[in-house]
Amino acid sequence: MPVSRDPDPMQPPRQPFWTRSRIRSAIIQVGFVALLAFFVHFLLSNTMTNLARQGIASGFGFLENRAGFDIAISFLDFGRNDTYMRAFWTAVVNTLVLSVLGIALATVIGFMIGLARVSPNWLISRLAAVYIETFRNIPLLLQLFFWYFAILRPLPGPRDSLDLAGIVFLSNRGLYLPKPLLDAGAQLGLAALGLGLVIALVMARRARRYRAATGQPRRVAHWWFLGLVVLPSSVWLATGARLDMSMPELQGFNFRGGMVVLPEMLAAILGLSIYIAAAVGEIVRAGIQGIDHGQTEAAQAMGHTRGQIMRYVVIPQAMRIIIPPLTTQYQSLAKNTSLASAIAFPEIISIIAGTTMTQTGQAVETIALAMLFYLTVSLFIAAVMNFFNWRVTRLSF
Amino acid sequence: MKHTSLLSTVAVMTVIACGAVSAQTIDEVRQRGHLNCGVSPGVSGFSNPDDNGNWAGFDVEVCRAVAAAVLEDADAVRYTPLSNTERFTALQSGEIDMLSRTTTRTLNRDTALGLNFAPVMFYDGQGFMVREAMGVSSVMELDGATVCVSAGSTTELNLADYFEANGLSYQPVRFDRADEVLAAYDAGRCDVYTSDRSGLAARRLVMNDPSEHVMLPETISKEPLAPAVRHGDDQWFDIVTWTVYALIQAEEFGITQANVDEMAASEDPNISRMLGGEGSPVGEWVGLDNNWVYRAIAAVGNYGEIFDRHVGPETPLQIERGMNALYADGGLHYAMPFK
């Protein structure tokens, strides 16, 4: 009887190695990455060749050159004799300040609008709806122009400024405020305030833990008073209690001294936060309405007030629904700061992809810098918000 | 707006990144059947759509002259309005064939930006405009002023240099688009509006009340405004260069739009050669037919006619010839010989 050469029907047939799923997917992935790398290399080298052939300068050496222009709003010290590199950092800080202020304001307004939207009061709920539908449906660029010219047009020139007690001045050149000049004593006082805040926060945390462990409440109000009022003021008084102010004064065309919020800054913050707040309001409403009504009823049955139900039952759970879409809105606000360049706010697009690009002619490099910046900011916001999301999904409250 | 400007820049960079820009602009223009010309987005007298939506103005005539020379049709031009920050990338990437847009010729632009400049069409300088009610009569009195200026312009840098040199402080308010600069100044955001003097004259016309504003006497810079093409295409550069010279030379010879036919039959060998008379090599030399100069002048007239038609004393802009007169009349325009 001949020995059968047929494969054992009980064993799976031997396959060529490339058909095995793990190896196959590895090959596809390596192939894809190689293709991508080749594509990027092709783009880069072709760009360099084309730029060189047309005699267009390339590289990042220009960042060391003197910028030669001025920037009206800068939180860093920037002058025309600084380099393009410093102009870039100035633009970065300006953009970040605008984003952070915008996000803070948009969150506050957005939560108020969201809560108002689910209010049982018909008028409040309708007003919130009108707010949302109005600001959500008009392009942001138009809103920025609206705020900019709405601020500029009715305000008087600097010589006819509206003034408040002779120390605060409002004109079409901006809002001029007195600026505190912090001497060593005042700085020490501020440091004491920071220390006091940390102490109060630590005590509040300990009280929360104590209550979680024992069920017994523990008062911390005196710690807050001590940390925020007694400690800093006693340090300040002990060091001489001096606080000098730089006052805005009209000299020539404009005010000198003090500090100023320029109309560009004001319009940019207003425009961005009011626009994003409309979206945040809808997200908050959706979050609150996403919590099962049984939860509210159960809390009511336990005798909680409406405020308590919101604060302890609904909002903590709603945050889990709210945070992921909120991240998108924050990123969108940070990216939309680019539109503020249209109303002369000196941010990344205006300084880097605008003036620097045209003065140096290095379009590829400047646009790449701008893209890198927005990418970094967006990823950073996503990372921070994912951390918060992780915190609230742990249900540790 | 700003958004589209960024988009177009990115689009333009993609073009730089992906495709090689052909060196033979003239073949592309002929094949396409029209010239792509970059102009200012609405500056009275220089480039502005007229009542019928056709682009007209001093800068536009250069595009028309080149189109007449190359395509035998002055109307075969597509105009691309470009902001300050868009203009160079548009040219570099091949989106436009030439830029005729109140652009100052500078060392940096001529070299690092990869541009070649044709002869200067308009000699200008940076000036300052203020409200008459401010009672200012010199830039030296502007210490501490707020100044509205175009971002990415030579103006922006001159402003910083001049105020630094004179120990004056100022606060800049910068916009990419010229109409936004104007709107902000007109709304009272700035004490001062600075730009090329011709640009100030043009934009004053569209302010709420033009009579409220005065030009200060100082001219703080040289702004030679010239058409530009890309590096690396010498034939195209020659065509644009000599089209501009042809317009200037025509004024010198007294050739006008009206008498160009008559002049073509002139006994003067210089005029006859330039206008493509018997045995003239002017076409062969630049790679066009012999009548290209004739067509350019027949389409737009000579330099003086263009100037008077769009920006001269008889127009709302009321700009005197001054530096822009022919060399023979004490100005700076001097065409190289058509020999």
Image (cartoon, rainbow, N blue to C red):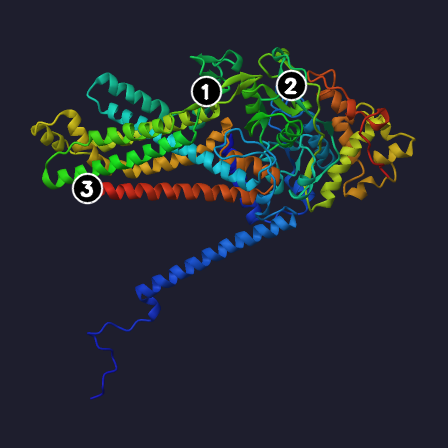
Dot 2 falls on a residue whose secondary structure is helix
The percent coordinates of residue B254 (x first, y second) are: 85, 25
Question: Residue, x 15% and y 25% (percent of image)?
Answer: A306
Q: Which of the labelled discs sits on residue B306, or is there none?
A: none
Q: Is residue B278 left or right of residue A372?
A: right
Subunit bearing disc 2: B
- Which mark is nearer the camera, 1 or 3? 1
Dot 1: what SS? Answer: strand
Label 3 marks which chain's residue? A
Mark 3 — residue?
A395
- The image quadrant that residue A222 belongs to is top left
Say which residue label 1 marks. A175
Residue A65, given in percent of the width and then of the height, sits at 61, 42
Callout 1: residue from which chain? A
What's under tag 3, amino acid-wise? Leu
Amino acid type at image mark 2: Glu
- Residue depicted at x 73% and y 28%: B122
Side of A362 relative to A89 (left or right): right
Query: Is disc 3 on the same chain as disc 2?
Result: no
